[in-house]
Image (cartoon, rainbow, N blue to C red):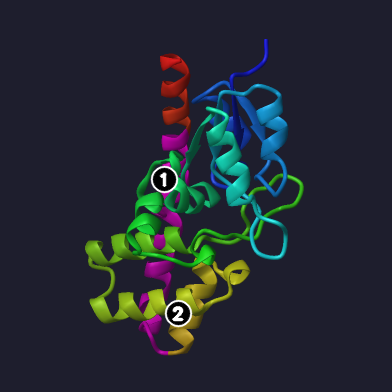
Amino acid sequence: MKARAVIFTGNSISHEDARKVLRANYQPPVRRFQIENFIQKGYKVIGIIDGIFFDRAAVGHREILSALDAGIKVVGGASMGALRASELDTHGMVGVGKIYGWYRDGVIESDDEVAVSTNPDTFEPISVPLVNIRETLKAAFVSGIFNEKEHNDLLQLAIDTYYPDRSYLGLVKEGAKRGLIPEEKKNLILDFCTGNEVDIKREDAILVLETVKKLIEEA
């Protein structure tokens, strides 16, 4: 029996983990000119979580609008889905999650907030998305590990770092080297960030899956 929903993901949540939430047709991160194929195949719900960025052709606005015009429910969140939903929610695309809200409200604007470098075979991220770093550094600050200036300086360093190079180890090492954090705090901060990461992309990806599941049940 043909799946009633197709989900584009792989970076924010693995296909294996996603299937534990929702049975659907799981595809790699979406790229340009893929949506039309699933419109033609009669899918009623499309979930966009991850997608191709920058030097490769990203999914276009017109492709999503074509799906919406065909009466297909399109849900986005977490990564490329959040970005496109913030741009197309007034046309009927459903946006969910904190990252979508940040893009919608102008809290963040750049594509590289959610971009990661990935394993080309598994789509698994091998760098840390800036949105996760934001939430993790915030949690570290709330816990009292560092003061507001140290938090702000580390966050700015992360923002200034090219997205494929972002990692907690690199951030802490460079922060200590530049005198943004005390050398004696380096291991404490690194242990917190790696052991207590706030994976906001994964959380939002699960919200996309739960929303798609609800739409299927209501159909």
Q: From the image, which quarter does the N terminus lie in?
A: top right
Residue beneath disc 2: 157
Tell me which label, 2 or 1, sits earlier in the chain. 1
> Most extreme residue toward the bottom, as rendered?
178
Left or right: residue 117 compared with residue 180 = right
**Residue 96 makes an appearance in the image:** yes
Query: Quick check: 127 above or below 180?
Result: above
Q: Position of residue 193 (x, y in %)?
A: 41, 61
**At which x and y percent is residue 205?**
47, 40
Please state the horizontal and vertical placement of residue 158, each as a whole percent of the image. Answer: 47, 74
Q: In the figure, 207 relative to 146: above or below?
A: above
Distance from the alpha carbon under mark 2 to that under mark 1: 32 Å
Q: Secondary structure at mark 1?
A: helix
- Give the residue at mark 1: 89
Q: What's the magenta region?
A: 179-208
Q: Position of residue 159 (x, y in %)?
A: 46, 74
Q: Residue at x 35, y 49 (%)?
A: 98
63, above or below 20, in the image = below
Q: Relative to residue 6, is residue 111 depicted above or below? A: below
